[in-house]
Amino acid sequence: MNTGKSIKLFLVDGTSSGLVTAEIGQWTGKATVVPRPKLDGFARRPDAHRPGVYVLVGPDPQRTDREMVYIGEGEDAFERLRDHIDRKEFWTRAVVFTSSDEQLTKAHIKYVESRLVEIGRAAGRSTLENANTPPRPGLPEADVSDMEQFLDHVQTLLPVVGVQFAQPIATRRVEASTAPVFELSAVGARATAREIDGEFVVARGSTARVKGVDSWTTGKAARDQLVENGVLELTENGKLYVFTDDQSFSSPSLAAAVVCTRNMNGRVSWKLVGTGQTYADWQDERLRQAEQEARQRDA
């Protein structure tokens, strides 16, 4: 059973475009989001000069659908970021993880760096600029346990500050999911999907129409990118595209638009397998059940 976590976000400069810190409950670690133009502000902070692990994030110049990420470590986190101003041009922000109790050693941060690279490669969501996975240093068993807990918190905070590279790929989440299955059959295409972790994931083997209508706008660029990346491939007869892998979308409507190559209201076009209930009705029913449970609890 998942338990709740208390996360504290602090806008250091009073704006969301400036430095932001993120902390979890009583954890001694801290994440600091550093926009590249605000590196001087980070330099003035005491935690900037502690040992830390950092993630550089920016657009992938070769693939518009992906971010580029570089993971590193340094005994003085700021000095390492400063080194990357000229060496790495892609990054627009960095997320730096340090510890307020100053107990992180060089071996600790190298271990976390190595594990984060492993996790990023396995997830496959972003282009890793790291050429190789750094070797893990030898640590006592107790220290390994501590650093794995540190990593758990790092993986919790990264999506909170808008960095997704460490989230599991859709395929693994689909295989492990018990979420309801929705289907969409229209214009000769047929697709199935699940809603997982806030994303609408179309299953591998689903099909999509090739030629869109003239008025199609929503999702057209996304469809073209999926074709370019090989996620959508033509069937043998060339009449349809087939999904070669599970693919995440931000909404049912975007997924429906890519499948049917026209503007679609995914809330009514996706139907629950076995009942024919629309996604909208299914979602409304869940909300009603939640409200009823809340009233019963408070009665």
Image: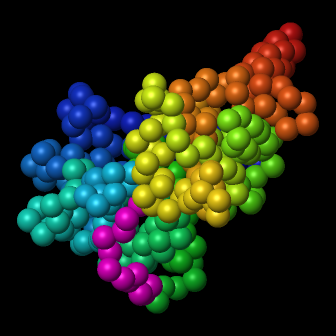
Magenta segment: does it hold 127? yes
Q: Residue drawn at (47%, 71%), measured in percent from left and top?
A: 121
User: Along the horizontal axis of the image, is 234 left or right of 97?
Assistant: right
Q: For this view, does 275 lie left or right of residue 26?
A: right
Residue at 20% from the left image edge and 59% from the top image edge: 90
Say whether residue 105 is magenta.
no
Residue toward you, 103 or 86: 86
- On screen, residue 265 above or below 168: above
Above or below, 52 relative to 214: below
**Quick check: can you spot residue 170?**
no
The main secondary structure of the magenta stretch is: loop
- The boundaries of the magenta stretch are 126-137
- Which residue is found at the position 33% from the left and 62% from the top? 69
Q: Kindly tell me whether residue 292 is visible in this rendering.
A: yes
Image side of residue 131 versus residue 119, left or right = left
Q: Position of residue 106 (x, y in %)?
A: 32, 78
Image x and y of residue 129, in percent: 31, 70
- Residue 267, x across and y down, in percent: 67, 25
Total labels: the figure holds 0
- Residue toward you, 248 or 1: 248
Quick one: 76 or 224, which is closer to the camera?
A: 224
In the rendered image, residue 147, in percent from the top left (x then y), is placed at 50, 70
Q: Quadrant of the C terminus?
A: top right
- In the current view of this chain or complex, which residue is farthest to the front? 237
Q: Residue at x 70, y 57 (%)?
A: 205
Residue 27 shown left or right of residue 248 in the figure:
left
